[in-house]
Image: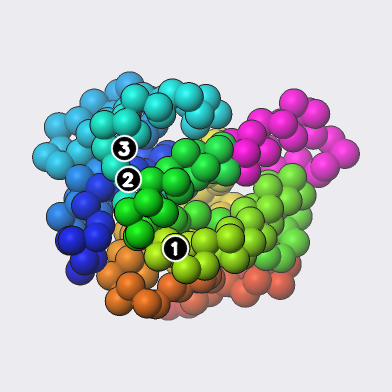
Amino acid sequence: MPDSALYRCALVTGATSGIGKAVVLALRDAGLQVIAVGRSPEALAELRAEPGVVVVEADVRQADAFNEVLAQYPVDVLVNNAGVLSTRAAFQEMDPAEIDNMFDINLKAPLHLTRKVVPGMIERGHGHLFFIGSSAGRAPHPGAAVYGASKAGISLFCDALRCDLLGSGVRVTEIAPGRVQTQLYKTAMGMQAAGAELYDGYESIMPEDIATLLLAALSLPQQVDVSRLEVFPTSQAVGGGRMVKTLG
């Protein structure tokens, strides 16, 4: 379990479904006060009913929207989870607006929010910054050139940020999963198409698995910083994003 003397309050973006929601509930169950950030009023209403969870309706691209909640809650754990894969088109076929959209949400927003919470963590002498990356930021995937570039930016940022924070007591962990069964591809492809192409007959990582990994990294002794967790379904290899269907 996380050290309750150090880690009392967490903020999670993209909290209304998938990995974000699983992380919110796992951190809450571990005894932390959790601020759940999302854009869906209906989904946030469900989280509002959960004890130990404070909900904030906000667009992560608007960094100043967090000023009030950050003034009220000293954040010890930040989980930059919000992300978007708005299309799986080849780069030359993309709407140029989608380039800005993915970089704004996947890369720029986490950097701006991290910049807001880091000074308080440094002042208190502890903190843990989590970034949900992707295998697409570590190896090429067809139809994900821009998405992969945004996640590769997160990966290098984590390495550089760790250098800047040496000696501060603030830890930095990137979690870079392969295929997780979430809304990410379903948004880009449509529910039925994503199920048929990506999930039906395959074993995927579940959001709760990522939450378990995050909690494990947070629970390690303060002198241990897990810099990067790359995790894949047993049936997926990173080269070309290949997966095999489950036998049986």
Left or right of residue 235, residue 39 in this image: left
- For residue 229, above or below residue 150: below
Identify which amino acid the numbered label 1 is placed on: Ser
**Three-letter amino acid code of the residue under disc 3:** Ala
Residue 75's disc is 2
The circle on residue 107 is none
Residue 168 tag number: 1
- In percent of the image, x 27 and y 37: which residue is there? 73
Between tags 2 and 3, which lies in front? 2
Q: Which residue is more in the foreground, 59 or 114?
A: 114
Task: Give the image quarter of residue 87.
Answer: top right
Magenta range? 81-108
Rendered-image quadrant of the C terminus: bottom left
Q: Secondary structure at mark 3?
A: strand
Of marks 2 and 1, which one's residue comes earlier in the chain? Answer: 2
Query: How many residues crowd around disc 3 within 10 Å: few (fewer than 14), some, or many (20 or more)?
Result: many
**Residue at which label 3 appears:** 36
Q: How many marks?
A: 3
Q: Position of residue 189 (x, y in %)?
A: 61, 39
Tell which of 161 and 144 is nearer to you. Answer: 161
The residue at the far right in this view is 92
Element under disc 2: loop
Marks 2 and 3, Cα distance to the nearest angstrom?
A: 12 Å
- Examine the image and state in which quarter residue 61 appears: top right
